[in-house]
Image (cartoon, rainbow, N blue to C red):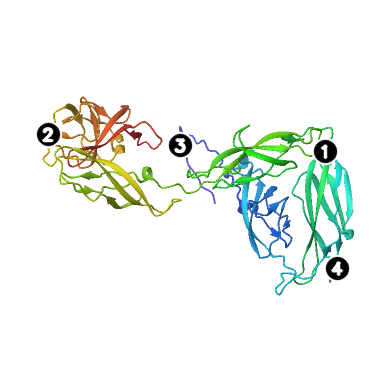
Amino acid sequence: MSTKINVRSPFYLNLTEPTIPLPTFTCGIANILNLSIDQQGQINTPTLSYGIIDSITSSDAGFSNGKFATVSTATARNITIRVLIPSGFLNVADGYIDCVNVVTQPALVTSGPSPSCVSGPITNGSIPAQTLDVDGDSTTIDLTSYFTQGSQAIAGYSIYNPSTVVNASVSGDTLTLSSNAIGGTTTVHVSAFDTATNSCTALQSISVTVNAPNQTFACSNNGIPAIQGGSIAQDGTITNPTGPANITAIKDTSGGSPITSHSANNTGSDRSVTLFFDLTAPAGYANAGATIECSSPFNQPAGLPTFDCEAANLSGQQISTKGVISSGKTSLGTISDWTPKSFSEVSSDTSRTVTFTVDVPSGYSNSGTISCPKTITQPASTPTCPSGGTFYISQGQASEASFCTGATSLTKEVVSTSGSFTTGKSICHNGSLYNGGGLYHAVATSEVTVGPNYGSFVIWVIDSNGIIQEIIEWNCNSGTTGNGAGAKL
């Protein structure tokens, strides 16, 4: 289908061919498949539809050297797969995304009235540690020497190699290990399985050292980072990155004191956190055994914020001449109670402290109620108009932001007990206490105009007894909402 557009001179069309927006790379697009854990706690390396696996880690107890400890009951495991973002996606500059998967590790119980598996291959001794040189040195291992079949022949082997130090592959019964361009140590896991029903697997773990005697271990080795992966959970739990070196300390500043966890993120938004790791240069390097410090940035996800009195933002509370308390309102939450319930009459304006109980709304990390004390001035039982400073105020407005919709003139003359901007003072107009209705009144010592482009100004919240309950400094040109920003004085 096409559209015909007729244009008469002197009009011209300047058209640009539309472009298709790039998609955002997500864990759904990565499409992690075939992720599993066997009875020995060995992870099966998954496949992806898009992207490349950078690291596989877990913050769960029992996770070490790329595998989980065996369990006697089926256990849910959290596995974080860091996927490198391929080109052609909107968020490619982020480098990677972390995809958290929950996988059930089956129990390994081989005896008793309810075994989880029976028979199956068994190990025959241990595969000895292997030593290679960098840049393609290789060795082969005959796995039939280290695994013995059970009631059925061994059907195959699964490999999990969590490191970039070596490549590992199996062809038939032969395991081949070959070095890459960096030195270091790692552990390669190999498990044998058969096709018998309810059969047990058997696991061998092989320590591999790759020597690089002419290289000095550093934070980047031949373009490969010394540490990869890792994470910080919302509650501050740290999952260490992986790499060929042992991590001996974690710090939140370079050269700082060791930490075991980071502070929880209750800010309401994700934040970037950089951690510093002390690494022991692995065997095979010229500086083996030396300590080096390497940093890595992490994205710490946000948790729910804590509800407090600042978030509740109490307003409109007042005390009558009879000592009756008006509960006012909150910006968030609901006032469900207060103490004390009332006060005796007083002969002069008196500051009172009332503690309000506020129900915590949903969407916050805490629940139940919080207590918010507030100081309120109770007017005298027989109020009289004060004599003192002269001020000029505006008509009352519903909020501070109401003054930012246009210019407002301050023309109403009032008298305050004090000659300065002070809370708890009485306000009179034409010889009577001014009923402010709990509204917001711009105030100055002379007749001026306030609003957008007029700079900062002062606002009084005046209750129906003529008492100044709050003082706020406001500026319509601050903030990003167009409604201004300010602070209580």
Query: Which of the marked residues, 4 or 1, is nearer the chain's N terminus?
Result: 4
Residue 56 is situated, as x and y percent measured from the top left of the image, at: 68, 50
> 345 or 357: nearer the eye?
345
**Pointer 2: residues within 10 angstroms few (<14), some, or many (20+)?**
some
* Marks 3/2: CA–CA distance: 76 Å
Residue at label 1? 284
Please tell me which residue is depicted at 12% across the width and 34% down the height of the picture.
385
In the image, residue 467 sits, relative to residue 177, either above or below, namely above
Q: Which mark is residue 153?
A: 4
Question: In front: mark 3 or mark 1?
Answer: 1
Residue at label 3? 8
Mark 3 and mark 2 in contact? Answer it, CB < 8 Å. Answer: no
* Marks 4/1: CA–CA distance: 39 Å
Query: Which of the marked residues, 3 or 2, is nearer the chain's N terminus?
Result: 3
- Tell me the SS state at disc 1: loop
Residue 226 sits in which quadrant?
top right
The C terminus sits in image quarter? top left
Answer with left or right where residue 410 lies relative to residue 36.
Answer: left
* Marks 3/1: CA–CA distance: 79 Å
Mark 3 and mark 1 in contact? Answer it, CB < 8 Å. Answer: no
Q: Is residue 34 visible?
A: no
Residue at label 2? 385
Answer with left or right where residue 247 lies relative to residue 144.
Answer: left
- Tell me the SS state at disc 2: loop
